Image: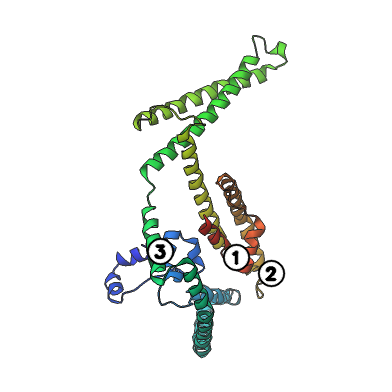
Amino acid sequence: MCAFFKTLQNSSLAPRVAALRLRGVVPAFHGHAHNRGCQVSWHPMYAPGVGIEDFEECERTFGKSNELAGATRMATVFHRRQQIIEHFNFHDMDKHTSSGNFIYQNYRQVIERIASDEPALALLREQTRTSAVDQENDLASERLHLQGLRREPAEEVVAADYLELLETLYKLDAQKASAVAKREALGADPVARGFTAKQASGIRAWASTSVARYAAHHDVVADFEVQHNVEARWLPDSTDYQAATKVVHQRRYRRALDNLERLVIQRFFELTKLNQSGVGYKQRRKIGQALRTRAQAIKNAIDEYNKTAKLMRPPRRSVTWNDVLDMAASGNSSFSRTRART
């Protein structure tokens, strides 16, 4: 269930929500930043009766009201409130005046879409030998499947945790072996072998630290194996190790994709704002400075996504910074389609 709807049910508004049979939705664009389980239940695409409404009017309304900031920055409280009231009064009248044309245009779009999509849908049903009932059942099955994924299977969680411990253990083992080999290379007289006293001291210290780190983590792994009845430690070429590696790669890929999509959609309106007319130089500069700071987070998310995408079998396509900019310019949700293919 949507977290917002849970809040309503636990609030004093719960009786009115039940009496009105209220149903919540997430806005069409921002909804793609929500997880798939939320989308199939609360996105307008899957809500009966919403038509082509995108539920993004709040974003557009407050986007327009933000233009008041420049004109009222130096005004008194009275005049600031006066302009805000006048703005929304005019906004209400303007919306009321244009509502007839808005309804007509939406009606026309819906009729055209039905006329073009129904034959295509009928052909698809014929090719796949399915019906409308089958499609509704598929959606219901997907919802049930995603509800079951809210908690990962216990055995997969244990396998993934064990694998991560082993990866760290083998990495520390390699570091320890390298450090010990360098320490042994010092011999009895490091100076005679071309090492300074400072270099020799650093090599010995690093070797001791590496051995201690490996021993400490080895104890952690051993305790984990005792707690979960692991009889034989997995080696990198073992079947269990390879199977767990696949699970971990999928988990990391999904998390990287979720994080990238969330960051891009959060920054979408700031990216598009830079290209809008009517944005003053100072405002554009402030937005640009904020984006430069936040862009690093997106670039880091892109790097993490591409790293995990290469580990998938088959590998997923890589994403570039230009892909993010193209997404902002076109307004599509290409990352959501990437998710659908995975």
Q: Label 1: which residue? A: 270
Secondary element under disc 3, as helix, strand or loop, is helix
Q: Earlier in the sequence, mark 2 or mark 1?
A: 1
Q: Tell which tag, 2 or 1, sits nearer the viewer.
A: 1
**Residue 222 visible from this viewpoint:** yes
Q: Find residue 274 and report its horizontal and vertical position in percent.
A: 65, 67
Q: Tell which tag, 2 or 3, sits nearer the viewer.
A: 3
- Judging depth in this view, the residue of 238 and 165 nearest the camera is 238
Could you tell me which quadrant the N terminus lies in? bottom left
Q: Residues within 10 Å of mark 2 (few under 14, many from 20)?
A: few
Amino acid at dot 2: Tyr
Q: Is residue 294 above or below residue 159?
A: below
- Quadrant housing residue 267: bottom right
Amino acid at dot 1: Glu
Tell me the CA gap for discs 1 and 3. 37 Å
Tell me the CA gap for discs 2 and 3. 51 Å
Amino acid at dot 3: Asp
Q: Find residue 168 and report its horizontal and vertical position in percent.
A: 51, 33
The residue depicted at 40 percent of the width and 57 percent of the height is 146
The residue depicted at 41 percent of the width and 72 percent of the height is 132
Q: Label 2: which residue? A: 281
